[in-house]
Image (tube, rainbow, N blue to C red):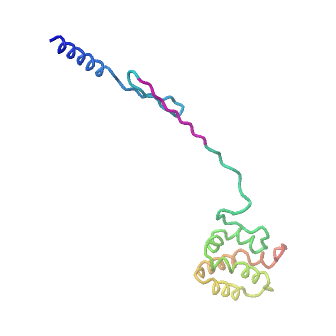
């Protein structure tokens, strides 16, 4: 009988101790946590590092729409006075590939009608014909004098 009483007493002590055990998790504000239960300890810590941004690159312009470094008077005017139309054209391969020839055509006009330049530009632009036409309309209104050097600036 004393063995049964001993086992019963030992079982009761285990139940009481088991009920008294708690698990605790705390934030260490350093990126890690610590946790444990009665009779044990465990913790984990993590640290993370990141890098800040870096300066610009001289290589890829990241898709920015801007005049080239060697821009002619016509190209500069296109970006100054017709930026929306110019960037829309540059976004379409067929339109962009004909821009330099179009600007040269405008600059070479001796006070003549720029229609043949605009028609050639739109005709060669393929899928970008609508963008080429819109840019040509803006250029006729805002840049023809500048492209031809009539504003006392350079032509090319």
**Residue 47 sits inside the magenta stretch:** yes
Left or right position of 34 against 66: left
Q: What stretch is highlighted in magenta?
A: 40-49
x then y, percent, for residue 131: 60, 77
Q: Which residue is drawn at 79% across and 70% down?
A: 70
What type of secondary structure mainly makes up the magenta span? Answer: loop
Q: Residue at x 18, y 10 (%)?
A: 2
Q: Identify which residue, 116 or 6, lies in the foreground.
A: 6
Q: Residue at the far top: name it.
A: 2
Is 59 rendered above or below residue 126? Answer: above
Q: Identify which residue, 117 or 152, lies in the foreground.
A: 117
Q: Residue at x 73, y 75 (%)?
A: 143
Q: Which residue is drawn at 74% across and 71% down?
A: 77
x then y, percent, for residue 69: 78, 67
Is 122 rendered above or below residue 73? Answer: below
- Please state, as top left, top right, bottom left or bottom right, where the C terminus lies in the image: bottom right
Tell how many labels: 0
Q: Identify which residue, 9 or 129, lies in the foreground.
A: 9
Is 55 rendered above or below residue 127? Answer: above
Answer with the quarter of the image where residue 52 lies. top right
Left or right position of 106 against 152: left
- Please state, as top left, top right, bottom left or bottom right, where the N terminus lies in the image: top left
């Amino acid at each position: 009988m004393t063995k049964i009483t001993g086992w019963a007493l030992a079982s009761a002590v285990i139940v009481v101790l088991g009920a008294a055990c708690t698990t605790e998790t705390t934030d260490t504000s350093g990126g890690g946590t610590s946790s444990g239960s009665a009779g044990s300890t465990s913790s984990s810590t993590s640290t993370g590092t990141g890098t800040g941004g870096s300066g610009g690159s001289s290589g890829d312009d990241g898709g920015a729409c801007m005049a080239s470094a060697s821009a002619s008077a016509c190209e500069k005017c296109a970006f100054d006075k017709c930026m929306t139309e110019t960037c829309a054209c540059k976004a379409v391969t067929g339109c962009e590939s004909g821009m330099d020839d179009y600007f040269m055509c405008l600059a070479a006009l001796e006070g003549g009608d720029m229609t043949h330049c605009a028609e050639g530009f739109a005709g060669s632009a393929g899928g970008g014909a609508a963008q080429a036409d819109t840019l040509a309309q803006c250029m006729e209104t805002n840049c023809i004098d500048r492209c031809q050097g009539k504003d006392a600036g350079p032509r090319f």
